[in-house]
Amino acid sequence: MQKMKKIVLIDDDQDLCDLLKMQLEASGRFLVTTSSHSESALALIKTERPDLAILDINMPEIHGVELAASLAQHEQTAGIPIIYLTGMASPEEINQIGGGHSLQTLVSKQSPITELIAAIDSLVSP
């Protein structure tokens, strides 16, 4: 039996968080913790110590790219793989927000759940 992967999902849309949590956990491979408040996300990720974080790019308090930069600065969170979840059109637009911070993986909010799962699998072994 394979170990379930812990994921922290941060998105200001609570309905989307709930839907993605349900879909990911239905696969039987992931345990998902969500938050719709980016200002508390760093503390949540430090506490949960997930195998992967999924961050919305455009949030009211802290953009996902800024949050990722904060994670990279802390020893206990620096190695956590990140998937950026976005409704924006292109990686170029996202890079403008992040001031050139490199994007590891970008998945559209409109993508099917199978695409998000494939992105997760590309960053953490299934």
Image (spheres, grey):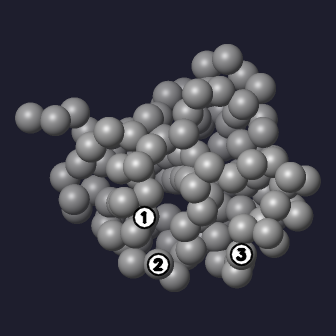
Residue at the far top in the pictured view: 75
The disc placed on residue 116 is 1
Query: In the rendered image, which quarter is residue 76 located in?
Result: top right
Residue drawn 67% across the image and 17% down it: 75
Q: In the rendered structure, which amino acid carries the disc numbered 3?
A: Ser
Tag 2 near tag 1, CB within 8 Å: yes
Q: Is residue 41 above or below residue 120?
A: above
The answer to whether 87 appears left or right of 73 in the picture is left
Name the residue beneath numbered marker 3. Answer: 90
In the image shown, does 121 or 35 lie closer to the viewer? 121
Residue drawn 42% across the image and 64% down it: 116
In the image shown, does 95 or 46 lie closer to the viewer? 95
In the image shown, does 35 or 74 lie closer to the viewer? 74
Name the residue beneath numbered marker 2. Answer: 111
Quadrant location, the C terminus:
top left
Residue 68: horizontal and vertical position, in percent?
71, 43
